[in-house]
Image: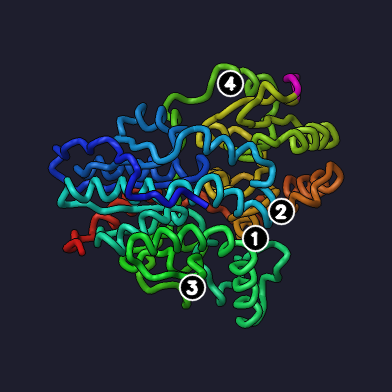
Amino acid sequence: MIDTAWDEASPPAEAPADGSGGMTVLLPTLGSAGDVHPVLAVARALRARGHRPVVVTSEWFEPTCRALGVDFEALLDRNAFESAARNPDIWHPWRGFGVLARDVIVPAMRPLYHIIERWADRTDDLVVASSILCLGARLAHEKLGVPQASLHVQPVVLRSRADEIGTPHLRYPRRGPRWQKNLAYAIADATIADPALCSDLNAYRSWLGLPRVRRPLNGWIHSEECIVGMWPEWYAPHQPDWPAHVTLTDFPLFDPGEDEGLSNDVEAYLNAGAPPIVFTGGSANVHGQDLHTIARATCARLGERGLFLAPEPDRLLGNTHDFATFGFTPLGALLPRCRAIVHHGGIGTTGRALQAGLPQVVVPHSHDQPDNALRVHHLAAGNFVPAEGLSTDRLAIVLKTELGRDPAERTDHRAGSTNGPDAVAQTITQLARVPRV
């Protein structure tokens, strides 16, 4: 349980005066780079429109925000982010959400509410545009009347019983009757989501004088005013049972440092031989030793060069002419020079792979990754191998098949809109300030 002495909490530092002349937009977000980087892209688009964006997230991302010249508010310290990332259960299909709730979602709920309350007291033109994990934003909307938009980067958070592509989990059949999908969602809520969230959420709601909620992920978590899906229609089309106020834009693709290009070490490796296959388990996955071993063996078996991206590359085996490991590398600059990509199925990496038109194999663990894997397969952009069934033999077979496909058989998704961040900015700033309760 979280600390219930909410009225005794020390208030955050005073909000600076808003001298931008535009609207102030708080952008709370939680999660890994795949969750935060799209918000940074939106922040830049808001600033270009004359508004004042304030990114509210983990201290882990403060240097990136400061480097971009974007205002920053700390929502969680680095230890909370690292604690979740280093827990191997964070990637477990069923236990992962519990880790995320305990270490990230619940601890951020009360501080976020206070941050929004403080800004609302000082700023007349205020909008909050938050990710699905930011419970404090929904509470502030209910209690304070602050306009709130939901910014969703993953289609899986918009539940649909009609969608025949995405599903709650890879083990669940893609096609099935509505009652079967209703049952799947109900079981997921009763056994995973509600036990992790409802006790702390409803205790704080009671303290705020708000009624209890149940099954918060089944609808309550979404804004009643504005929901923005940050993906194109062709990736996850509108569903008839989605809320009517859902607007789809495009992938808000953004890599910090993308304008600076690749590091000298990466450039040297790319120039030393044939285009490599890229492997990554995600920006926050520090448990990539098994994937690294399988990737190296798979490249040797197929006679391909490999390039592995990891948050802590020094912990993995050293580099050779045909297989090298590097830290964070801007995918927008890297992927056009590569042969294929094997990745975890995070939405940011998936969008970049689709943009580059590369053959891809998705190795999903949990969260939104299985849903994205199914969508990649449905789009004829690649295939997937569930993480629990990954082996050198299986990956080599699937990857060889994808590399050998006629390019004419692979749907090209490189064309299309590139104004995702600006479209998001335009949508959320249409929200008007409403009287506070």
Q: Residue at x 38, y 70 (%)?
A: 211
Residue 19 placement, left or right of 155: left
Name which of mark 2 and mark 3 comes first in the sequence. 3
User: In the rendered structure, are the residues bearing label 2 and label 1 in contact, judged by CB atoms less than 8 Å apart?
Assistant: yes
Q: Which residues are magenta?
A: 317-322
Q: Secondary structure at mark 4?
A: helix
Amino acid type, mark 4? Glu
Q: Residue 267, labelled with which disc?
A: 4
> Residue 435 falls in which quadrant of the image?
bottom left
Say which label, 4 or 3, has the lower sequence index: 3
Disc on the earlier residue, 2 or 4: 4
Q: What residue did someone put label 1 on? A: 374
Can residue 360 be seen by looking at this rendering?
A: no
Name which residue type carries label 3: Gln
The answer to whether residue 181 is left or right of residue 147 is right
Q: Residue 281 lies in what quarter of the image?
A: top right
Alpha-carbon span between mark 2 and mark 3 = 24 Å
Residue at the location (64% across, 46% down)?
90
Residue 324 visible at all: yes
Distance of label 2 from label 4 (alpha carbons): 29 Å
Q: Position of residue 164 (x, y in %)?
A: 61, 72
Q: Nearer the viewer, residue 133 or 321?
A: 133
Seen in the image, is 413 located left or right of residue 381? left
Residue 323 screen position, x and y as percent: 74, 26
For mark 2, give the secondary structure: strand
- The foreground one among 354 and 91 is 91
